[in-house]
Image (cartoon, coloured by chain):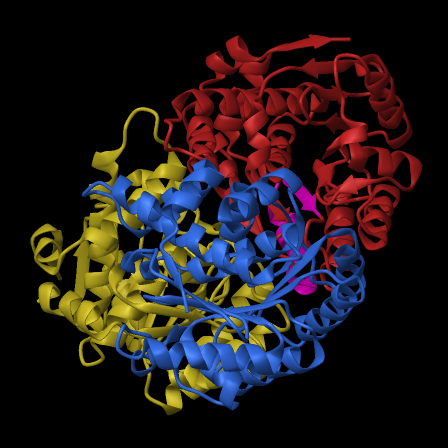
Chain colours: A blue, B red, C yellow
Amino acid sequence: MFEQIFENVRGKSPLVHCITNYVTVNDCANMLLACGGSPIMADDPEDAVEITGICKGLAINIGTLNQRTIPVMLAAGKRANELRHPVVLDPVGAGASALRTDTALRLLEELKLTVIRGNISEMKTLAYGSGTTKGVDADVADRVTEDNLDGAVSFARELARRTGAVIAVTGAIDIVADKERAFCIRNGHPEMSSITGTGCQLSILTAAFVTANPEHPLEAAAAAVCAMGLCGEIAHRRMTELDGNASYRNYIIDAMYRLTPARLEKGANYEVR
Amino acid sequence: MFEQIFENVRGKSPLVHCITNYVTVNDCANMLLACGGSPIMADDPEDAVEITGICKGLAINIGTLNQRTIPVMLAAGKRANELRHPVVLDPVGAGASALRTDTALRLLEELKLTVIRGNISEMKTLAYGSGTTKGVDADVADRVTEDNLDGAVSFARELARRTGAVIAVTGAIDIVADKERAFCIRNGHPEMSSITGTGCQLSILTAAFVTANPEHPLEAAAAAVCAMGLCGEIAHRRMTELDGNASYRNYIIDAMYRLTPARLEKGANYEVR
Amino acid sequence: MFEQIFENVRGKSPLVHCITNYVTVNDCANMLLACGGSPIMADDPEDAVEITGICKGLAINIGTLNQRTIPVMLAAGKRANELRHPVVLDPVGAGASALRTDTALRLLEELKLTVIRGNISEMKTLAYGSGTTKGVDADVADRVTEDNLDGAVSFARELARRTGAVIAVTGAIDIVADKERAFCIRNGHPEMSSITGTGCQLSILTAAFVTANPEHPLEAAAAAVCAMGLCGEIAHRRMTELDGNASYRNYIIDAMYRLTPARLEKGANYEVR
């Protein structure tokens, strides 16, 4: 099924409005192009709602949120909801500060979200209203392992039930769940965490996948997570002993550019619980 | 002639003030350094006009315009006009939203522009006051081909006549025109469109070229367009089967860093109409 | 000693709050990850002070300062001072405009700075209240050479005495000084100046090093400067005749990712005056 989902991305070339942080925005744009989508960024109050209207999907990332852009995120999200466009939220750093937590909760409350993609600490913050982090990374105490996977799956399903969104909790093992089913995904490589913005890129990628497959948000989000992880694996095999996180960053985007739907189908490593 | 133009860029190392979008700004800075120029970015109202004053040229890109930066673009542009510095405008997304269209038209009206560089849909929007786009990319229906090239050349010349600026319409075939002459350029590679910001980089490059060659804005802009396309060709030949748009991005900037004036002269592929 | 300092960075993985410019922010984040640290960026007034509180160190870079972010720099700096966190200032473009000069001087006056890292023109501006630049690069007339090195060392020591901060003046020869001692460092490669943001990256790196070694700010800053220069050397040896400044940028970050404490100890090229 992931083969068809990815073919839809390549075939439809979805135009995605990205309201995202300025740290990783360039990599997000190139990742979106690499998968076959098309990016546009707009965060001015007067501009953003109209740009949302010409796009097919919306990705919101609060990584460098500010007083000017928070209302824009809400307004663009409401416009996307009116148009029944998919909306993906990346609650970067929820739990790290009150503004990030409150903004993420407010977006969750006021918008109909299609997918929420974050690390486990961010997701716990959304679920319980507060949490602990290591900055924009998950708190070690929260990490999903084989030992606590059942509990994490239940947590994701319950959060999906409460929010109505597909929940994508990413880390060493990724969980992509709606209220009924959960994909447990074991693609990826630990060194992906040494690159800034692999999470941000995945959120934008997820937006492209659900935008091109609006009838199948769970499968589309799971396919995006598998695709990102698979590219992390392919890119890692390419690394020489001189390469570090900067080249790895480029190789992952390159791998997405070269990834075929058939290879995604074959390389996706998941079980459904 | 392009050889001398490029030698002037390398020799003078023009300091260019770039008011540009935050998506592609890093690549713009590295491209400017690669060609031999020197970048500085400033977009605070209090800072930008003074920074314009210490530079030799100005590039304005509206890709992530906002209420704070629009007046800065106007004020910096007026200062550059007073100083008789070249000003290059990249009307990113004109036609995609009212704010982008209106801002581009206002910049065109209030400033003396040396070069306007955009895709054909953006240029039609400037000419007719409205247009259609695919986000920041040209509408397929607008594209310049061998079949409609004569009409596109006439359009560019007429827009040059009306605005007093050199018009650089870039796409599969590039047209760089003043009211009398048009360079039709066939450098470049289709995969350049799979990288975010090749257009933005070209606009900054154009600013460096016209800044170092203020007496010859038409030829300087044409040389910049040829140089960018030629680097796209050189970089494409370097790509392996593992490389994608991220590596291609780096290779194009690398190619500009290595490009010699003699090689530009030899590799420039254009006719004058 | 540099071996132990770098081992502390790798071992403690310091979380550093970066208020930095949007031109080079992505490279700064990847450089911080490459050395073993962890970045978070926040520049909203409501968010930044709280984020400072969850971090262990703060880096302030005024490269794209604006009216919104200047008060944030001051507030975050004061919070870091209260918490006795190291604070590193990079006064990008001090001397190029009144706003940059005034802001740098105000940060110097109102904050207790651990390290100030800049080029010689920026440092002269801080010392004398005004100066000359080539944009964000040093004025050629200011450059530190073997001939004027003694004078430059005296200047750095005196500025360190007056400000209470470690002074890191970087260029062809780097000087890292407190009021008593100065490290004169001869690592690095001239082509590093053809990449945007090597100075910004070094400032963030310095913040990580002093954050992980709060008892030894002079040695930690000197180690960071040596590490950056050494990576510039290692990366340069990797370059092929097709590589330019874009690949060199990646290779330097890669080299930091691969650098071991022992190799830093061995490759650091300095004398203490």
Residue A63 % position (x, y): 52, 69
Q: Which of the 4 image quadrants contains residue B6?
A: top right
The residue at 75%/47% (across/down) is B77
The residue at 38%/87% (across/down) is C81
Q: Which image quadrant: the N terminus of chain C? A: bottom left
The residue at 81%/29% (across/down) is B141
The reply, left or right, for residue C61 in relation to residue A142 is right
Q: Which of the 4 image quadrants contains residue A25?
A: bottom right
Residue in front for this viewpoint, A144 or C247: A144
Residue A40 in view in this figure? no
Residue in front for this viewpoint, B234 or C57: B234
Residue B73 % position (x, y): 74, 52
In magenta, the rendered stretch is B44-61
Residue B52 shown in magenta: yes
The residue at 68%/18% (across/down) is B219
Q: Is residue A195 above or below residue C207?
A: above
Q: Which image quadrant: the C terminus of chain C? A: bottom left
The reply, left or right, for residue B204 in relation to residue C77 is right
The reply, left or right, for residue B9 in relation to residue A139 is right
Residue C75 % position (x, y): 51, 84
Residue in front for this viewpoint, A134 or B8: A134
Residue C194 % position (x, y): 40, 40
Residue B53 shown in magenta: yes
Residue A120 in view in this figure? yes
Instruction: State how many labels appear.
Output: 0
Q: Is residue C112 above or below residue A54?
A: below
